[in-house]
Amino acid sequence: MLKVGIFSFAGCEGCVVEFVELLNDHQDWLKKIDFKYAKILKKSEDFTGLDVAFIEGAIVSEADVERIKKIRDSCKKLVCIGTCATMGQPAGQRNFFNDDLKKEVQFLVDRFHQLPKVLSVKEVVKVDAEVQGCPMNDDAFVKVLNGLLEEFK
Ligand code: SF4
C-alpha cells in the first residue's frame, strides 16, 4: 500500500475536495492507498513514514514554514496540488497589493503572525512534482498518482 498524507495550507480546500471526488472514478486506488493522514477523510494525527505527501495551499506564516518542513522530513515524495501550492496564488493576492492596501491589512498580518510575503511550497522545501490548476487539473493529477503507484508498487 502507498502510504499517503493529504495536507492543506492556505487555500479554499477545493483541490483536496477534487482529490476525494476522483476516488469515485478510481475506486481501485482504495485498495492501493493507505490514507495515513487525511483530515478530510478521517481523524488524523500521525504523519510519520509517508511515501507521498500531497500539499494544497500556500505558505503564509512561520507556523506553516515549520509544518511544511516537518512534512518534508516525513515523506519520500512531496507533490503540490493546485496553484496556491505551486505558485502561491490565488491565496497570496496580498503580495500584489499597492502600498496603501498593504498598510490597511498590516494589522492582520501582524495579529496572525503572517510572513511578509505569501510563498509557494517550493520556495520553502524541495518539491518532487506539481499539478497545476485552480482547482488542480484532474488528468494531470491522475497521471502523477498512477505514476507514484507504479514507482512504489
Ligand atoms: S488552487 Fe484554487 S481550488 Fe486549489 S486550494 Fe487554491 S484556490 Fe482552492
Image: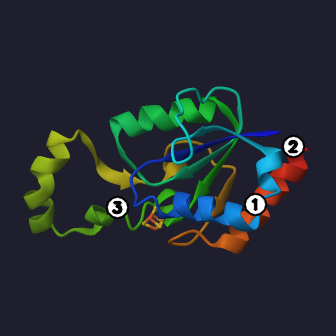
**Disc 1 versus disc 2: distance between alpha carbons?**
12 Å
Q: Is 136 located above or below residue 111 in the figure?
A: below
Instruction: Using the numbered discs, state the Cα–Cα distance from disc 2 to disc 3 in whole angstroms.
Output: 34 Å
The local secondary structure at tag 3 comes to: loop
Q: How is the image coloured?
A: rainbow
Mark 1 element type: helix
Question: Foreground: 42 or 69?
Answer: 42
Q: Is label 2 or label 3 in front?
A: 2
Nearest the camera: 61 or 55?
A: 55
Which residue is at a point 56% across and 50% down the rendered structure image? 55
Instruction: Give the Cα distance between marks 1 and 3.
Output: 25 Å
**Mark in front: 1 vs 3:** 1
Q: Amino acid at mark 1?
A: Val
Where is mark 2, residue-wise?
Answer: 152
Q: Which badge, 1 or 3, is on the more N-terminal residue?
A: 3
Label 3 is placed on what type of residue?
Gly
Residue type at mark 2: give it. Answer: Phe
Q: Nearer the viewer, residue 28 or 99?
A: 28
Q: Residues within 10 Å of mark 3 (few under 14, many from 20)?
A: many
**Residue 64 in the figure: left or right of residue 116:** right
Residue at (58, 26) in percent of width and height: 46
Q: Which residue is mark 3?
A: 92
- The residue wearing badge 1 is 144
Q: Is mark 3 within 8 Å of ligand 1?
A: no
Image point (52%, 48%), residue name: 40
Is the C-beta of the residue carrying label 2 under 8 Å from the nearest atom of ligand 1? Answer: no
